[in-house]
Amino acid sequence: NAGVIQTPRHKVTGKGQEATLWCEPISGHSAVFWYRQTIVQGLEFLTYFRNQAPIDDSGMPKERFSAQMPNQSHSTLKIQSTQPQDSAVYLCASSLDRGISNERLFFGHGTKLSVL
Amino acid sequence: GEQVEQRPPHLSVREGDSAVITCTYTDPNSYYFFWYKQEPGASLQLLMKVFSSTEINEGQGFTVLLNKKDKRLSLNLTAAHPGDSAAYFCAVSAPGNYKYVFGAGTRLKVIA
């Protein structure tokens, strides 16, 4: 079991460019989460999928961020027109989702996005 | 919504000393509590999962205390060693609420 795989580990974009981040959850996990990690804010919830269906994207900045899960083996987070304030580590996590909220989250190493 | 405040943001202790990290939360319905450890360059790893029904939880080299009355969760590292140097995050969730709310983290440095 390779754990949650995130690619790329580092991404540098220029202001206004697009960034796509990839996540491969642990096989058999039905819940996928995206968080944004900064020193100041810690971990901020972005969005959540259950069985590939988007359940809650209330943490996503509305205009430029979007997330998809086209199949059970990967999810993408796309940021259009990146801005310097988007610079952060983007974490993907997966878990079993048996209808209760006490499941541990398994995190990937994250993608460090730097917007110049 | 739930808010979690974690203190201190940075902590430096000498090897063999104890280290205490505290989280306070606001939602009285919160029932599941987690501590995660993130070593430099590594992913977050679960340290302990705590249920609302248990106030004292013993781990290897640490204790997690839950005070439901004060809505406070603490991680007590006894006899810290350099391998404990890492960032620690608490997380809180309520039954039926998948949205785990994390504290901002504590960066612990254990000096040999």
Image (tube, coloured by chain):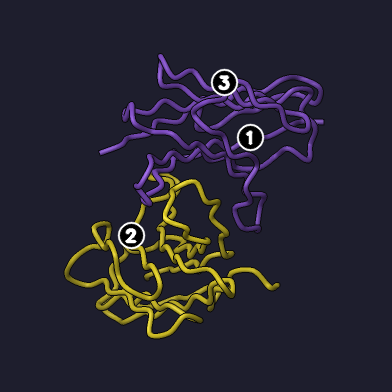
Q: Which residue is painted at 34% across and 78% down in the image?
A: A68
Which residue position holds label 2? A46
Mark 2 touches mark 3? (CB < 8 Å): no
Q: Which chain is purple?
A: B
Quick one: SS at disc 3?
loop
Q: Which chain is yellow?
A: A
Residue B33 point in image, percent of width and height: 50, 36
Q: Which residue is painted at 44% across and 19% down in the image?
A: B68
Q: Which residue is painted at 40% across and 30% down in the image?
A: B5
**What kind of residue is marked 2?**
Leu
Residue B103 point in image, percent of width and height: 44, 38
Residue B108 disc label: 1
Q: Nearer the viewer, residue A111 or A73?
A: A73
Q: Chain of mark 3?
A: B
Real-space Cα separation, disc 3 to disc 1, in angstroms: 24 Å
**What kind of residue is marked 3?**
Glu
Which residue position holds label 3? B55
Real-space Cα separation, disc 2 to disc 3, in angstroms: 31 Å
